[in-house]
Image (cartoon, rainbow, N blue to C red):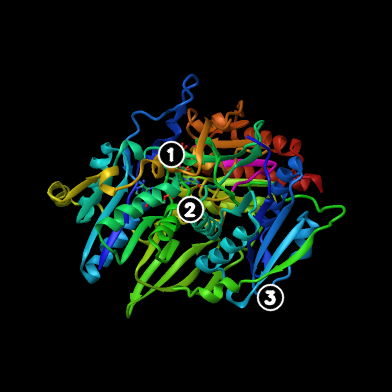
């Protein structure tokens, strides 16, 4: 079975509280936040490797990102992915999800036809959860997002997707694009051996010309949506500390509840 | 930029034979947007044996498109997307609003890709600016940053909105909408490679977080399942609801994912929010920042959560909880 996994390098979500907006330039200040593989994409990689272990074949990863992403993507190779493809070009910058999906689809088609394409359900930075469905549309194959369980029986895929307070069951056939949620599995730890092996695995970088794309249809230029200004939501409040013995504190809390019209 | 032309549409969503609240929340926002330019508001309902036309008209829809077809009995992304694409191409609305539920975000992404147009996800605000452009405000980096999104050239402009983000409107005093039956005949030429077999959804018991006047939120600092039980007890005593952070959910202490507050969960706006052992990560705070009064209890006096609180208590949760419970019981008795 030939499987592709879409992997997005993102600034580490643990550090989002450090992100600020420069009041003068109005640009994001996110320096020094390390890049990591998007958390749900690790589950996508794990799902792909598990299927390869069962059915054989090959797992590749594909990413559209700046050239610096190479190191982060090696973590995917270290987990057990066989080959990496990085789509990187200054013309790709500023892509919205529509154009991201289109660029990824162009890259995937250039590699080969895949039986399964996995993605995470949602990226931690943009967090749209659009790309899996949009990629399916651009590849012209069926797709489901928020997949929480997956088995293959006699060539039929049995898929459980997550919905509010429950799930849905689907049946489908290969090929398919699946966006996975973190409930699907527990990603393996990177073995030391994997890190060493990753160095020797094929790593291809493709730009605009390799994909034979017109600059007008990629990046910001090709994106139907355009970003406007950025702001930080006002979150701060002026705090009054309630101190004293616990009994006193509890009484003060009750006063606050009363004045908010509760407990009556 | 000239004035917006065309209609504002909302795509409704159902569960267990009823319209979800988010359908009305979207309708309220659509009415607000449309009122400025006098645009009509239409609601789309898909399903089998459905009849929500009058209910939507009562809440202000000028037009309700009903697409009643046995093939639409269960939500299935591809079938629904084919039908919607067809309807949108037929009427060319200016703006289409979807729920950003699990199904809604999948459906909106699919429809936007088919129509080759822009889509803004999980919008926290939608408005027309002074240039009459449709501004879609979306969260990024877990809600730490908000960014404006415009869709200048392609139509429709599609946006999704999480359930609970906007307010359900009042009923219209003089409802006047019309119901229009549309067909799903496009599906005659479409054979789905997928098959939705069943939907399993359990209505959680107890007061929903969104409806509670007081929400108690437990974080990782609650520390154990036993202490969590006292938190639940306090919740019952106060007629409130108990919510959680993701680490508390992952520990398995809570009643389940429907009680998660934050970017990946619910948005709550109770009169009073009390956090117990919550650090104040933006991922969580964006889901409770619009609460009335915010109280937080944390054993670390320097914790960032105090910067987003009206009242702070430096204490160990497991010590304060029993005292608070006792005092509140007493306060209630004294009132009787
Ligand atoms: C993509 C993504 C999405 C996420 N979505 C969400 C979301 O929707 N909702 C959400 O909540 N989180 C979400 N998170 C997680 C989020 O980033 C934080 O990790 C989380 O909110 C922290 O939860 P916490 O405050 O309970 O735990 P911690 O950050 O571990 O804080 C525990 C707090 O308890 C205090 N404490 C410890 N012991 C005691 C004690 N005995 N008494 C009193 N105080 C004590 C500590 O001082 C600390 O402040 C998400 C993360 C990612 C990456
Ligand atoms: N630039 C990208 N390169 C590779 N995969 C991506 C990229 N952007 C998004 N994805 C995939 O799409 C999923 C959903 O992302 P999003 O739609 O941005 O929330 C991610 O978890 C990735 O698997």
| Mark in front: 3 vs 1 | 1
Secondary structure at numbered mark 1: helix
- 3D distance between C-alphas at marks 2 and 3: 38 Å
Residue under pointer 2: B249
Is residue A190 in view?
A: no
Across the whole image, how many numbered discs are drawn on residues?
3
Q: Quadrant of residue B135?
A: top right
Number of residues whose C-alpha sits closer than 10 Å to that of mark 1, classed few (under 14), some (14–19) or many (20 or more): some
- Residue at the (75%, 38%) spot, across then down: A258
Residue under pointer 3: B49
Classify A180 as above or below B66: above
Question: On what subunit does the disc labeled 1 rest?
Answer: A
Residue B33, percent across and down? 70, 43
Tell me whether marks 2 and 3 sit on the same chain: yes
| Mark in front: 2 vs 3 | 3
Q: Is residue A144 left or right of residue B89?
A: left
- 3D distance between C-alphas at marks 3 and 1: 45 Å
Q: Is residue B98 left or right of residue A198?
A: right
Q: Is residue A148 left or right of residue B126?
A: left
Residue under pointer 1: A221
Numbered label attached to residue A253: none
Secondary structure at numbered mark 3: loop
Question: On what subunit does the disc labeled 2 rest?
Answer: B
Q: Is mark 2 within 8 Å of ligand 1?
A: yes
Residue B16, percent across and down? 64, 69
The stretch in magenta equals B267-279
Residue A217, percent across and down? 40, 45
Number of residues whose C-alpha sits closer than 10 Å to that of mark 3, classed few (under 14), some (14–19) or many (20 or more): few
- Residue at the (55%, 76%) spot, across then down: B188
């Amino acid at each position: 079975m030939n499987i592709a996994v879409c992997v997005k390098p993102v600034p580490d979500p643990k550090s989002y509280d450090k992100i600020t907006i420069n009041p003068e330039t109005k640009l994001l200040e996110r320096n020094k936040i390390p890049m990591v593989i998007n958390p749900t994409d690790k589950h996508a990689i794990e799902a792909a490797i598990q299927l390869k272990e069962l059915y054989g074949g090959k797992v590749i990863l594909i990413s559209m990102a700046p050239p610096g992403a190479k190191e982060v993507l090696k973590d995917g190779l270290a987990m057990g992915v066989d080959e990496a493809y990085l789509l990187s070009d200054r013309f790709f910058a500023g892509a919205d999800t529509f154009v991201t999906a289109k660029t990824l689809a162009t890259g995937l088609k250039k590699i080969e036809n895949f039986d399964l394409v996995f993605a995470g359900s949602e990226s931690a930075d943009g967090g749209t959860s659009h790309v899996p469905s949009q990629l399916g549309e651009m590849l012209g194959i069926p797709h489901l997002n928020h997949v929480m369980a997956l088995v293959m029986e006699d060539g039929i895929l049995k898929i459980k997707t997550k919905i509010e307070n429950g799930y849905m069951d689907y049946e489908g056939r290969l090929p398919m694009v699946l966006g996975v949620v973190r409930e699907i599995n527990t990603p393996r730890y990177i073995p030391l051996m994997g890190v060493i092996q990753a160095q020797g695995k094929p790593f291809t970088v493709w730009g605009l010309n390799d994909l034979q794309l017109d600059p007008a249809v990629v990046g910001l230029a090709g994106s139907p949506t355009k970003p406007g200004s950025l702001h930080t939501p006002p979150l701060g409040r002026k705090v009054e500390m309630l101190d004293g013995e616990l009994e006193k504190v509890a009484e003060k809390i009750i006063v606050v509840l009363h004045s908010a019209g509760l407990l009556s | 930029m000239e004035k917006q032309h065309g209609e504002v549409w909302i795509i409704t969503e159902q569960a267990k034979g009823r319209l979800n609240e988010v359908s009305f929340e979207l309708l309220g926002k659509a009415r607000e947007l449309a009122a400025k330019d006098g645009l009509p508001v239409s609601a789309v309902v898909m399903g089998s044996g459905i009849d929500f036309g009058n209910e939507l008209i009562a809440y202000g829809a000028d037009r309700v498109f009903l697409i009643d077809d046995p093939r639409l009995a269960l939500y299935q992304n591809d079938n629904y997307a084919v039908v919607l694409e067809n309807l949108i191409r037929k009427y060319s609305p200016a703006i289409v609003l979807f729920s950003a539920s699990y199904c809604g975000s999948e459906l909106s992404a699919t429809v936007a890709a088919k129509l080759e147009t822009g889509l803004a996800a999980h919008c926290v605000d939608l408005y027309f600016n002074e240039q009459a452009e449709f501004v879609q405000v979306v969260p990024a980096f877990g809600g730490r940053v908000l960014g404006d999104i415009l869709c200048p050239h392609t139509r429709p402009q599609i946006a999704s909105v999480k359930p609970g983000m906007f307010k359900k409107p009042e009923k219209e005093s003089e409802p006047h909408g019309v119901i229009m039956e549309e067909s799903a005949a496009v599906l005659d030429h479409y054979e789905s490679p997928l098959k939705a077999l069943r939907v399993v959804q359990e209505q959680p018991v107890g007061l929903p977080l969104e409806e509670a006047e007081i929400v108690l939120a437990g974080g990782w600092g609650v520390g154990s399942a036993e202490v969590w039980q006292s938190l639940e007890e306090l919740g019952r005593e106060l007629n409130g609801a108990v919510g959680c952070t993701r680490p508390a959910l992952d520990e398995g202490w809570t009643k389940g994912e429907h009680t998660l507050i934050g970017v990946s969960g619910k948005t709550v706006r109770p009169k009073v929010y009390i956090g117990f052992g919550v650090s104040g990560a933006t991922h969580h705070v964006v889901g409770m920042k619009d609460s009335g009064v915010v109280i937080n209890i944390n054993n670390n006096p320097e914790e960032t959560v105090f910067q987003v609180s009206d009242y702070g208590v430096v204490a160990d949760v497991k010590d304060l909880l029993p005292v608070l419970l006792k005092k509140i019981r007493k306060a209630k008795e004294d009132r009787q």
